[in-house]
Amino acid sequence: MKKIFFNISAIAILLTIAVSCQEDVLDKKAVDTFNEELVFSDINVVNAYLGKCYDRMGGNTDNGILGAREDLLSSGTDQLLCIHRPANYVMLKGTMSPDQLGYFVNNGLGGWLRWNNLYANIQDVNRILANVDAVTITPAQEALKKQMKGEAFFIRAYDYTTLLMVYGGAVLKDQPYKLDDDFTSVKRSTIKETLDFILKDIQSSIDNIPASIEQGRANRAAAAALKSRVLLFCASKLTNGGWAEQASNTLISFPAGSQNSLLTQARDAAKDVMDGKYGTFSLVGTVTDPPATLTAADVQKYAETYGSNFVQKAGWNSETIWGIQFPLTGGNINNANIWYGPNGYHNWGNNNPTEPAVRSFEMADGTKFQWDKYNPGDMDVRTATNDELAADPLRNPYNGREPRFYACVLFDGAPWQARPSDAAGLEPENKVQTGYYFKTVADKTPYKSGLDTRASLIEAWNGTKTHYYIKKLLDPATAGQYFRGTHSWIEFRYAEILMNYAEACIELGGADLQKGIDAMNMVRNRSGLPDRVTTDQAVAREFVRHERKIEFFAEGHRFYDIRRWMIMDQVIEPIFSMRIEHYDTGLHKWIYNKADKADDRMFTDKKFYWVPLSRDEMNKAPQLQQNPGYN
């Protein structure tokens, strides 16, 4: 049986691009003969074709690109809750199977990281690499052609990296498939062979991309950052004997004794970027020790500095290695503000921070947040009167927290944008309202519900289910109700390089341990937190894992981290609501409401660390080996 797994190409899209920028090319042939021959007749049309390959990186459908999606990848972790399609996160439900892939197969709003979408893009990239050298060019276009080849190698490496980190060993192909190819012999390669293929593509990318390149195109540092990322994943517990029963399964496991070598490679790949081998990068802000006591102004400044990474619109800052740009007209779409913003602003309120994630942010002095500080043993309820808050503002669990908390989370009382006209004048103005208002404690029903709750006067159905909204990734200057965002999605930033280096060094231990701690402390200091100090490898491991959890909150890294560390059984649990009550008598209550289950989650089987191939794919190509545990 012969079968094509891959989309041949989006000819209609290319036609649109060619019409807009290459009318002289289309003059050569009638529209009804627009085909591959025409695409590869002009280097500028090939360049436009390459642009569409950027759009489909990571296995996305036409709704969003890379991380800028309505349903965030971090909602597949303990950090966030997708309120509109929670059942799509099947690995958190114990329901994932070849017949039920949820988020990993659905088109439109829910689907990305898809096996078939990834291969469709790889097929298009392979077509470019196979044909670009035959395109007639002028001597002045030679540099562009070489650069485009480097970009194509980067995109293919990125897509194969996604396949590796989601599915394990992949079907490796460096030439485009043809209609008469026999697919019955196609098989998946080992995870080691897949990594080797990726590393070769990354090097080819670095060799072909010039030292200086237009912002938005893949640069050498992006390829180097991808190398750091994939090597750290491959150096993990998950792929190196952590699943003891599958340690000999070469689709998901490296040969015994590989881990130290992979950790060393991951360390060195990050160090190359840190040493400026591919350009000069640095954290935005200061990396010196913060003041022993932060003022409110200090906290705000640190929060704004950290948060500035995620609202960049023009030239990128010193921390940004590579990302996706979103112009106001044309090109890709960033609807982050309407997707994630509070419903009381006529936004859709998706991807709510969970209570455990909110509690994981530290205090401003770097100490651990302690929910039961004022009532030891009670992990569900906090209370405070106005008088008590005046004497000790920290009784409010949202006061006195580390700067990144204020850059990442919109909580009850958090300052936000001016309200739309139909909410103007409703107090408190321009602050998030996720609480309920009562006259006395005897009242059973609130006389007013916050505008950003599911009992709101405005779009209640889009209200938060956890009583928090995400702030990170939103642009404070954009009213999502009316306007799309123009801020970039940052896929690789220097903080990741430092944290990858830190983790690899800490896992290697010995003389590398302190080097790792020093790199981690740079990230902490930039965020207004004091140094971590330890000589204990196990303690340092917990430090670096916590730092990744906070530093990369909502960016998607957590989806890979909790899998590669094999801690999903420790962190995945049902999601409950935080109910906030304000009384006219001056009493305030914060109640982790175990009676209000926002989402029932569980982690029941190690097989869910890997996504299976779909039943449809296996039926079409039964020689492809399925991932372990799936029938």
Image (spheres, grey):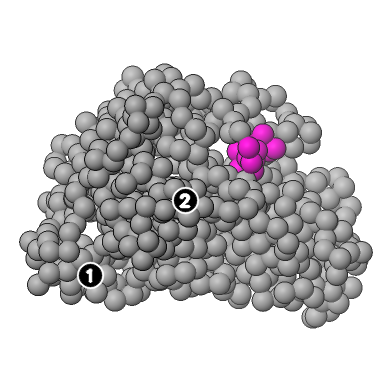
Residue under numbered circle 1: 617
At mark 1, the secondary structure is helix
Q: Nearer the viewer, residue 144 or 290?
A: 144
Identity of the amino acid at label 1? Glu
Query: Residue 498, located in which quarter of the rendered image?
Result: top left
Q: Nearer the viewer, residue 311 or 505?
A: 311
- Answer above or below: position of 626 versus 276: below
Q: Residue at 49% x, 21% y: name it.
A: 280
Identity of the amino acid at label 2? Glu
Q: Residue at 72% x, 74% y: name it.
A: 459
- 1 and 2 marks in contact (CB < 8 Å): no
- Answer above or below: position of 157 versus 618: above
At mark 2, the secondary structure is helix
Q: Earlier in the sequence, mark 1 or mark 2?
A: 2
Q: Which mark is residue 265?
A: none
Q: Is 245 placed left or right of 286 in the picture?
A: left
Q: Nearer the viewer, residue 37 or 211?
A: 37
Q: Residue at 26% x, 70% y: name it.
A: 614
Residue under numbered circle 2: 23
Q: Position of residue 51 (x, y in %)?
A: 43, 47
> Closer to the camera: disc 1 or disc 2?
2
Q: Residues within 10 Å of mark 2 (few under 14, many from 20)?
A: few
- Answer above or below: position of 172 versus 264: below
Q: CA distance from mark 1 to mark 2?
A: 40 Å
Q: Nearer the viewer, residue 625 or 91?
A: 625
Q: Position of residue 575 (x, y in %)?
A: 54, 67
Q: Position of residue 84 (x, y in %)?
A: 55, 72
Q: Which residues are magenta?
A: 303-314
Q: Position of residue 197 (x, y in %)?
A: 21, 41
Q: Residue at 21% x, 62% y: name it.
A: 627
Q: Is 5 placed left or right of 573 in the picture?
A: left
